[in-house]
Image (cartoon, grey):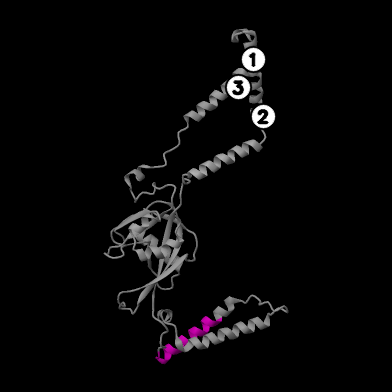
Amino acid sequence: MAQRFGALRLSCASTSLRGQYRTLWDKSEKKHAYPSGLPHIVNYNHVSRTLVSQAQGVAKTAEESGTVAKPIGYPWRIVSAVCVQRFPTLSRQKTPFELEFEEHKDIKRAERSRLSNHELTLLDYARKRAERDKKALAESLDDTQLPPLEGNDEFDELQESREAEVGQFRPAPRETLADLSDDKKSLHRKLDRVLYLLVKKARQEHAWQMPQGGLEKEESLAQAAVRELREECGSGLNVKFLSGAPALYFSYLNPAPSPAGLIGSKVFFIKAQYLSGNVVVDNSELDDYVWVTKDEMKGYVSDEYYKKVAPVLID
């Protein structure tokens, strides 16, 4: 009964329920109307529960009488897909304009900032050293004949230690071994870009896609997404779902109606953040997988698929 009611919208109840919904809305609006005429917030949960109860009653009556209402539209297969994202671990390399602008900001910041105690001491030391060198030049004296400057050894040692510390620093390379070998199964590549998980099904056409699968009985989109990701990619892939609501939806028609009478599928994408682990291919659910950027995805999925999902992908 639940399956039949979920697949069909009853035309005999459609007009009646819409009219009853309007009546419930009007009653709620009139009951709670403000003097200024602004509409009051209606208790949508009460209205929805009432309409669902009435619709179930209509469906039950149709089942008991042995009559089935004429469907409005066509039945669709509901599919939940998971858009798994590995976010960047490095910042993007700056463009020449960004580098020039950053240098300009540093200069302006230095001009307007107050000097620290260490900088004031260095300026004082430089002034004393200039006076000492001027006196040595005027009187033709060498360093051994001049009195030592106070703090000379202390500041020289400090400067040398800091310069040595800076000189020993070696930043890690931005390109990893996975980048050099173009290993798209590795997550240690394109560290400054967002990577997306694509899986390959055991078929010839439209084999590459994001993990997805149809809803089972009394299953929500979020529950189906969790189950499908575990079934297709294994329990070793750990992700965090960013929302229970889909970020994207699109539909497509089947080449021919299925034995169940379904003419197509409606696919709802739920976003998830990669945490740890990786995909395990068991050759039953999947044949292969890759982690690709938005641009690289074009080489795997169909043009139609890419155009549908591209608006919600981060470059």
Q: Is 62 colored magenta in this rendering?
A: yes
Q: Quadrant of the N terminus?
A: bottom left
Whole-percent x, y for residue 191 in the image: 42, 47
Identified by mark 1, the residue type is Lys
Instruction: Name, please, the residue furthest toward the front.
Output: 138
Residue annotated with mark 2: 117
Whole-percent x, y for residue 236 in the image: 38, 54
* Number of the front mark, 1 or 2: 1
> What's the distance in space between the residues labelled 1 and 3, CA to CA?
21 Å
- Element on which disc 1 rests: helix
- Residue drawn at x 43%, y 70% as measured from the top left: 219
* Number of the front mark, 1 or 3: 1
- Element on which disc 3 rests: helix
Residue annotated with mark 3: 155
**Could one spot residue 313 in this view of the protein?**
yes
Residue 16 position (above or below residue 96) = below
Q: Is 135 colored magenta in this rendering?
A: no
- Residue drawn at x 50%, y 88% as measured from the top left: 15
> What's the distance in space between the residues labelled 1 and 2, CA to CA?
26 Å
The magenta segment:
50-67
Which residue is at the front of the view, 303 or 67? 303
Identified by mark 3, the residue type is Phe
Which residue is at the front of the view, 242 or 296? 296
- Element on which disc 2 rests: helix
Upstream in sequence: badge 2 or badge 3: 2
